[in-house]
Image (tube, grey):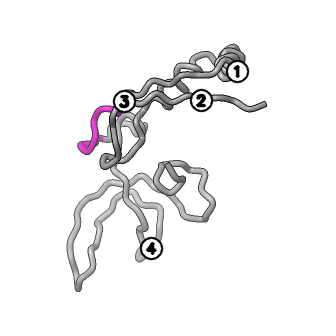
Amino acid sequence: MGVFATRSGFRPNPIGMSSVVLEGMCRERGQLLLELFGVDILDGTPVLDIKPYLPYADRIAEATGGFATQPPRACLRADFTDAARQALVTIERRYPGFAGLVTYVLGADLRPAYADTTDTIHKYWIES
């Protein structure tokens, strides 16, 4: 995934990010107008992108989401080389749970829906 397709706050541009409440939408003179609540921008500031609230990824108390209520399931098996496995063991000593997180993230099928989704085994390695 590219940085602009994710919710990463580490972006190579000065575009701000805000979590807001969408109160409503309307069309006026051929333009779509969004009624937003809790915005920390000036009136008239263009909204460049909208992403839905995802309860499993975003942590905002009392917020609700209806787009995707469950996280995607990991469906690909990640197979590590000996060097990568050893590196994970070393990191795991300092950051418990890291190996499980890496395995889960690599196992998530991040391909778009139109791509081939047959189970695939990916092999990961670390070059020294």
Q: Which of marks 2 and 3 is nearer the N terminus?
A: 3
Q: In this view, does 29 lie above or below 104?
A: below
Q: Which residue is drawn at 46% across and 27% down?
A: 121
Check whether the beta carbons of the residues at disc 4 and disc 3 lie within 8 A of each other: no
Observer-side mark, 1 or 4, equals: 1
Q: How crowded is mark 4: few (under 14 residues within 10 Å), some or many (20 or more)?
A: few
Q: Distance between the residues labelled 2 and 4?
A: 43 Å
Residue 14 position in % (x across, y down): 60, 65
The furthest residue to the right: 128
Residue 124 is labelled as 2
> What is the three-letter code of the residue carrying label 3?
Asp
Closer-to-camera residue (93/53): 93
Q: In this figure, which residue is indicated by the disc labeled 3?
A: 119
Query: Where are the magenta residues, as a range?
Result: 64-72
> Residue 93, located in which quarter of the rendered image?
top right
Is residue 94 visible to the viewer in this orientation of the structure? no
Q: Which of marks 1 and 3 is nearer the N terminus?
A: 1
Q: How far apart are marks 1 and 3 (CA)?
A: 24 Å
Q: Distance between the residues labelled 4 and 3?
A: 44 Å
Q: Helix, strand, or loop for circle 3?
A: loop
Q: In this figure, which residue is indicated by the disc labeled 1?
A: 83
Q: In this figure, which residue is indicated by the disc labeled 4?
A: 45
Q: Distance between the residues labelled 1 and 4?
A: 49 Å
Q: Helix, strand, or loop for circle 1?
A: helix
Is residue 18 visible to the viewer in this orientation of the structure? yes
Residue 75 position in % (x across, y down): 37, 27
The furthest residue to the bottom: 29
